[in-house]
Image: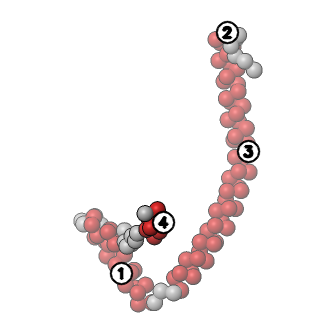
């Protein structure tokens, strides 16, 4: 419906009605949507739990205890020394992308 030919109060009333109706429809369908999202989250959580258990089973017990001790120490010291939280930073060695060398070798 076009609002161009309407007076300002009529236009405002129509737009308010349409927005209220839109919000109402979102609200009544929200339960179904959230229920589906909850089911997906539960299945993803179970899969993540299985993956974690698989990884965790490969770590030696002594190493796990050492990591837990490091975690407790960092959490206890974080207020006085924020750099204690650096143990939670992921440290990786970044290698060169091999495709760059192949591409360079092909075109040179």
**Horizontal placement of 16 versus 102: left or right?**
right
The residues bearing labels 1 and 2 have C-alpha atoms spaced at a distance of 72 Å
**Horizontal placement of 106 versus 48: left or right?**
left
Q: Name the residue under label 4.
A: 106
Residue 88 visible somewhere in the drawing:
no
Label 3 neighbourhood size at 10 Å, few (<14), some (14-19), many (20+)? few
Q: Which of marks 1 and 4 is nearer the N terminus?
A: 1
Q: Earlier in the sequence, mark 1 or mark 2?
A: 2
Q: Residue furthest left?
A: 80
The residues bearing labels 1 and 4 have C-alpha atoms spaced at a distance of 51 Å
Closer mark to the observer between disc 2 and disc 3:
2
Label 2 neighbourhood size at 10 Å, few (<14), some (14-19), many (20+)? few
Q: Tell me, for residue 103, which label it has, or none.
A: none
Q: Which of marks 4 and 3 is nearer the N terminus?
A: 3
Label 1 neighbourhood size at 10 Å, few (<14), some (14-19), many (20+)? few
Q: Where is residue 75 in the image (x, y as percent from the top left)?
A: 34, 70
Identify which residue, 2 or 40, lies in the foreground: 2
Mark 1 secondary-structure assignment: helix
Q: Which quadrant of the structure image shows residue 11?
A: top right
The residues bearing labels 4 and 3 have C-alpha atoms spaced at a distance of 57 Å
Residue at the (53%, 81%) spot, across then down: 55
Q: Position of residue 2 (x, y in %)?
A: 72, 18
Quadrant for the N terminus, please.
top right
The residues bearing labels 3 and 1 have C-alpha atoms spaced at a distance of 48 Å
Q: Name the residue under label 1.
A: 69
Mark 4 secondary-structure assignment: helix
Quadrant for the C terminus, please.
bottom left
Q: Mark 3 points at which residue?
A: 29
Q: Mark 2 points at which residue?
A: 7
Q: Which of marks 2 and 3 is nearer the N terminus?
A: 2
């Amino acid at each position: 419906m076009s609002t161009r030919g309407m007076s300002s109060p009529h236009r405002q009333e129509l737009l308010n009605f349409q927005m209220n109706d839109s919000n109402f429809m979102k609200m009544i369908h929200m339960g179904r949507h959230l229920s589906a999202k909850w089911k997906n989250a539960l299945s993803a959580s179970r899969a993540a739990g299985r993956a974690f258990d698989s990884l965790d089973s490969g770590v030696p017990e002594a190493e796990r205890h050492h990591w837990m001790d490091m975690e407790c120490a960092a959490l206890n010291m974080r207020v006085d020394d924020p750099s204690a939280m650096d143990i939670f930073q992921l440290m990786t060695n970044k290698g060169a992308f091999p495709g760059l060398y192949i591409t360079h070798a092909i075109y040179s």
